[in-house]
Amino acid sequence: MSARSRPYTSSVRVTGPPSRSRVYDHREHFRKYIDLSNDGRSRYCRSVPDLVLGLAAVPIMTELAPSNSEYGLASSSFYVLFNDSAVLVGLLANRVRSRWVFVVLAALCALAQVPVLLSATLGALFVSRILMGAAEGPANPLTVHTAHSWFPPKDRSLPTALTQALAEISRRRVLATIAEQRGA
């Protein structure tokens, strides 16, 4: 029988003491869901810059005087590196702990605000939006990747649904808060 026609078998022999069956710890299971809810709720920050940009559209257009197409281009520049950064960070996420990837993305998200703080120009708005998109692009895939690393394959559907639902619930909460403050 050739090597190609043989069924897959592992040639690695595991030695050592027999593994003990793990006792179910409900506290650890509950902690995973709490961490999962925090991951889902933290993703609402992605929608806040878009909301603020939309609410500030009229003042930005009167102060910077861009044309409608320039303002639209500045708004959509968020997506220039969005997908590329999601792919690159996805490749990196298998090699680096998710915690540190989240820290770097949060730092990049904070640094993306600096160009607009230093100089309120259309160019600074472009740079800020591109950096923000690069920082926010991997948020959803990385959250799902992290959730999947915490749960066995048969239990992954509920955590995935929770990450998506909690992000939307948080986004709606932000919208309601903004609408309440504006008196709408």
Image: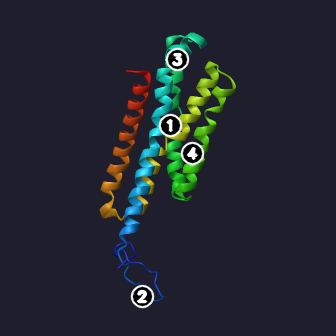
Specify which label sits upstream in the sequence, 3 or 4.
3
Report the number of discs.
4
33, 18: nearer the viewer? 33
- The label nearer to you, 4 versus 1, is 4
Q: Which mark is residue 18?
A: 2
Specify which label sits upstream in the sequence, 1 or 3.
3
Mark 4 and mark 1 residues within 8 Å of each other at the beta carbon: no
At label 4, counting other C-alpha atoms closer than 10 Å, the crowd grade (few under 14, some 14-19, many 20 or more) is many
Q: Which mark is residue 105?
A: 4
Specify which label sits upstream in the sequence, 2 or 4.
2
125, 36: nearer the viewer? 36
Q: For mark 3, what is the residue?
A: 71
Q: Amino acid at mark 1?
A: Phe
Mark 2 and mark 4 residues within 8 Å of each other at the beta carbon: no
Left or right: residue 184 compared with residue 45: left
Query: Is any atom of residue 65 visible in this view?
Result: no
Q: Secondary structure at mark 2?
A: loop
Q: Please tell me which residue is depicted at 42% across the width and 88% down the height of the picture.
A: 18
Q: Quadrant of the C terminus?
A: top left
Q: Amino acid at mark 4?
A: Leu
Task: Residue 69 in the image: state x and y as whole percent.
Answer: 50, 14
